[in-house]
Image (cartoon, rainbow, N blue to C red):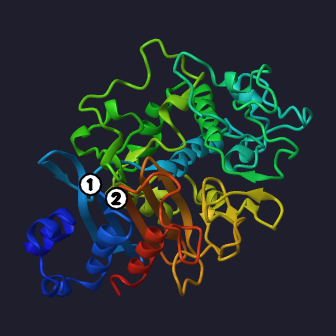
Amino acid sequence: MIVRLLQRCAPIFLLATGVSPTLAAALPSADVGLERILTQGEARPLAGLAAMRIRNGKIVYRYSGGFARKNGADVMPLRSDTLFRIASVSKFVTTVGLMRLVEQGRINLDADVSRYLGFQLRNPDFPNVAITTRMLLSHTASIADADDYVIPADHSVSEFFDPSRRLGMANYHFISGHRPGSWFSYCNLCYGLLGTMIERVSGERFDLYQQRHVLEPLGIDAGYDPAQLRHPERLATLYRHTDKGYEAVKDVAAQFVPEAPTNYRIGTNATIFSPQGGLRISLDGLYRLAQFVFGRGTFNGVTVLSPRTVQTMLQTDWRYNGHNGEGTYPIASYGLATIQLTGAKDPTGHPTIPYRGYHGGLVGHLGDAYGLRSGFWLDPATHDGFLFIADGFPEDGKEKSGDFSSFTKVEEGIFGVLAGAGK
């Protein structure tokens, strides 16, 4: 019983009871490693950490520690079914929904997205070059987040590109001098546009479309709108751990107002649902998503995508060659909402390796927002996986840098522990 408490409630339990090093040593080595990361990985302890190791499609190790939410003495321990705003891992799930429309012939990956958005989208530097669906998915559309990538519900995404916004302004959303399709620059706004395309083509509100056509068929308890969650009591608050303590920064309210007002016009502005990062999902939900990938689009007898479409998502669409992209993340190879960890150097000059001794094979996505870091990393050939959610990081830019990669030191540590877990 005490081991289970240590797993679920650390670091609170460890700190409050003064558990001895002898008892800690009796725990599995992976537990000890993740407890150390939870309590010592950053300058101040993280709020919570959930992690899972998959080998040959099976869970061989699972860990949950810390808290999901707290209010004074009232503390909700983190569990494997705790829902987190998972950040950019959401992009993968959004793309699954979009690719269903591609399979139906309703969206073309290489067509001008203007036809799906209902307005002309062109980089003013290249007015005769179409921006395609594939470019939006692979962050090569020459579009920038600029000052913001979410706009109020009663506005249209077309306003991001109003001619009154000119080069040099903080709200200018085009990258100057780079032809669409030629330059990688990580862009959240692109996924707000993709979500809006899903709405216009399907005639369904983005969050409801994803629920009906992706999440429910896969049996995943998740959603993009906190007010619509089936189990809001499982939703974690996201924290930053600053010198003032744990500061709640996202999913704080006891009761949530729906993201879409009753007069919301479908197909105008899916950014309100944050297709780029707003999915609330648990570690258990990520495992089901992993099974969907291992099943090449089918899980529990339900087919959501064809094997060919899944392979299209996983394969490389853009590869860094030293002068065709920018960014600070460990990305040197990108597909359709997937990062391939090939070991090649990213734009910062670091190798894209998640742990020492890594020999390649992992593909998936990372997440980074509101004090949370997440990882959804799979080897489709071996059916191995590394899944994790860590919350309570310091302010942006104050995280401990990785020792050998563009991952943070905490992420490198989690990968390192999981690499040896469950053997």
Residue 223 place in picture, x, y as percent:
38, 40
Residue 300 visible somewhere in the drawing: no
- The amino acid at mark 1 is Asp
Q: Is residue 33 above or below residue 22?
A: above
Label 1 packing within 10 angstroms: few (<14), some (14-19), many (20+): some
- The amino acid at mark 2 is Leu
Horizontal arrangement in the rendering, residue 196 relative to residue 207 (left or right): right
Label 1–label 2 contact, CB within 8 A: yes
Q: Which mark is residue 7?
A: none
Q: Which mark is residue 81?
A: 1
Quarter where residue 141 is shown: top right
Horizontal arrangement in the rendering, residue 127 relative to residue 357 (left or right): right
Residue 407 place in picture, x, y as percent:
54, 67
Tell me the residue at 59%/84% (across/down).
359
Quarter where residue 215 is shown: top left
In the image, 225 versus 221, the foreground residue is 225
Q: Which mark is residue 283?
A: 2
The answer to which of marks 1 and 2 sits earlier in the sequence is 1
Q: Is residue 69 above or below residue 325?
A: above
Query: Dot 2: what SS?
Result: helix
Residue 185 place in picture, x, y as percent:
72, 51
